[in-house]
Amino acid sequence: MVNRKKDSPDASLSFMRNGITIFAIESSCDETSASVCRDGIILSNYTANQTVHENYGGVVPELASRAHMQNIVPVVDKALSTSNCHLSQIDAIAFTQAPGLIGSLLVGAQFAKSLALALNKPLIAVHHMQAHVLANLISDPKPKFPFLCLTVSGGHTQIVVAYSPTNLKVLGETIDDAAGESFDKSAKILGLPYPGGPLIDKYAQKGNPHAFKFAEPQIDELDFSFSGLKTSILYFLQKEIKQNPEFVLENLQDICASIQFTIINILLKKIRKAALQTGITNICIAGGVSANSSLRKDFKEMGKKNNWNTFIPDFEYCTDNAAMIAITGHFKYLAGEFSDLSVSANARAAWE
Ligand code: KG4
Ligand code: ZN
């Protein structure tokens, strides 16, 4: 790396030029986000959320890509200005290549590729699920390798073992709905707007988690299934509403607490099983659902009981954000994992 300290007239800017500076873009779903990371330290992480989907019960792909196109330039500007970083100081551009909504991914991918071409800087394609796991390497204390990670998002539920930042293996995953989807679909049945996860979390705080019982799936090994739970909730509510049309209104907090309790129970049982099977005691959670207040609390308690070292990303690094793309870009830069400009966005790419 060239040390350009002497060339710069501005002492604060020259400080920025000593290390590896990664500029990152995330646009896989409904958040447009940009981040600057220098030597593994996040200097900025700016995200524009899309509220346009609230009334549709889920993300509308066409509306999401349009919103990304509107948001991307202001988001990039904001991430650069808050980091005090100039485009000329960037060593590489990282972006979310996969998986996600293709129209959404394309906006970020094309922007990142154009920037790399214009600045003549290397490009780093990042897998979104790897980035969720590595969000645990942003803040201190950080997990030592190998560690396990339960990644719970709107599109995925996985148990991953990380041997190094660039050597990760999926041990188990959902065979149907993801945990976040389960929160969102349950919320939709209850008449709550999208995304329902944070609302269920909010109402559950004042409810009784044992008020109602829902069936738990019996799935082999370290895989998950959540589609049966959704059906069980739907049939339960249909039956109750027939007898009392005000049932949801009168019992919303208890219903939310019971749904949340069931989902968390399914998740924690599996991570415990993975810990027992692998003997790994550094355990993380990640992804949007790891923002859930009960999951965070129960996971920490389970860790204490089992003598694990537990890790949870800071709240802002749980849901989709570009800081996790930037930190992954940092480690891929160190490993020399670059992409050429022919790389394209991919809605479904599995892990390498
Ligand atoms: O990781 P993420 O931002 O996007 C994907 O990669 O899918 O995760 C979004 C998911 C949504 O399903 C949302 O409802 C859920 O995370 N989520 C929550 C909470 N905050 C976000 N679920 C439960 N409790 C929360 N506090
Ligand atoms: Zn995500």
Image: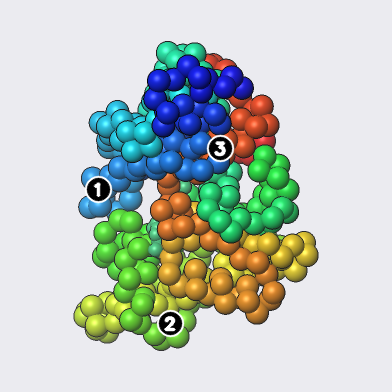
**Upstream in the sequence, badge 3 or badge 2?**
3
Q: Is mark 2 on a helix, strand or loop?
A: loop
232 vs 127: above or below: below
**Spot occupied by residue 326 in the image (x, y as percentages of width and height):** 50, 38
- Identify the residue at horizontal 43%, vertical 69% (top origin): 293
Instruction: Name the residue tied to disc 1.
Output: 51
**Upstream in the sequence, badge 1 or badge 2?**
1
- Identify the residue at horizontal 56%, vertical 53% (top origin): 136
Instruction: Name the residue tied to disc 3.
Output: 39
Residue 334 visible in the shown view:
yes
Instruction: Name the residue tied to disc 2.
Output: 209
- Identify the residue at horizontal 22%, vertical 52% (top origin): 55
Of 77 and 178, nearer the camera is 77
Q: In which quarter of the image is the N terminus?
A: top right
Judged by depth in the image, the label closer to the viewer, 3 or 2, is 3
Pointer 3 local density, CA inside 10 Å: few below 14, some 14–19, many at least 20:
some
Q: Is mark 1 on a helix, strand or loop?
A: loop
- 52 on left or right of 261: left
**Mark 2 residue type:** Pro
Of 61 and 126, nearer the camera is 126
Of 74 and 344, nearer the camera is 74
